[in-house]
Image (cartoon, rainbow, N blue to C red):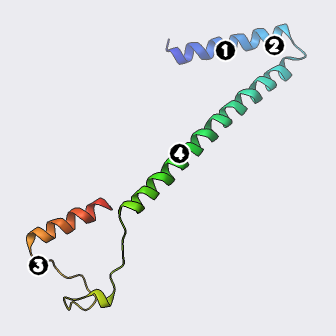
Amino acid sequence: MPKKQQLSERLYKLHLECATLWPTTWHLIQSTIDSSIQQQIDNHYNRLNKKLDHLLQNNQQSALNRHTVRLFTESDDTRGCNNTICPPEDEHTARNMLRIIMKYI
């Protein structure tokens, strides 16, 4: 029998045993236990989400600090391409441009 199934059966038997021992109060006891466990789980996931948000924010901020991107404007177009993407002058420049672009994809 798989371990998960064994644990489920054991938990079910314990639940029946507790219900027999405390027939009038077991429902309240179980509800209190469930609420406590749920609160601990919620706290744990809230902390994990805050840490993840903080890491993502730091990662995005450091990426922005490393690379300053300036938009290409018409006045920057010294090659006369009329606001279109011009092919690079040589293969080396083309490879460098492709390598830079791939960092952002």
Tell me if residue 98 comes above or below residue 15 in the rendering.
below
Tell me which amino acid carries mark 4: Leu
Q: Residues within 10 Å of mark 3 (few under 14, many from 20)?
A: few
Q: CA distance from mark 3 to mark 2?
A: 82 Å
Tell me: 105 left or right of 49. left
In the picture of the structure, the residue carrying the numbered disc 1 is 11
Q: Nearer the viewer, mark 4 or mark 2?
A: 4
Tell me if residue 87 comes above or below residue 14 in the rendering.
below
Mark 3 / mark 4, whichever is N-terminal: 4
In the picture of the structure, the residue carrying the numbered disc 4 is 52
Tell me where residue 95 sits by quadrant.
bottom left
Marks 4,2: beta carbons within 8 A: no
Tell me if residue 44 comes above or below residue 81 in the rendering.
above
Q: Nearer the viewer, mark 4 or mark 1?
A: 4
Tell me where residue 99 sits by quadrant.
bottom left
- Secondary structure state at the residue bearing disc 1: helix
As drawn, the label of residue 19 is 2
Tell me which amino acid carries mark 1: Leu
Q: Nearer the viewer, mark 3 or mark 2?
A: 3
Q: CA distance from mark 3 to mark 4?
A: 43 Å
In the picture of the structure, the residue carrying the numbered disc 3 is 89
Tell me: 80 left or right of 28. left
Residue shown at 34% from the left, 86% from the top: 73
- Secondary structure state at the residue bearing disc 2: helix
Mark 4 / mark 2, whichever is N-terminal: 2
Q: Residues within 10 Å of mark 4 (few under 14, many from 20)?
A: few
- Secondary structure state at the residue bearing disc 3: loop
Tell me which amino acid carries mark 2: Ala
Which residue is more in the foreground, 3 or 104?
Answer: 104
Q: Position of residue 104 (x, y in %)?
A: 33, 62
Q: Residues within 10 Å of mark 2 (few under 14, many from 20)?
A: some
Q: CA distance from mark 3 to mark 1?
A: 72 Å
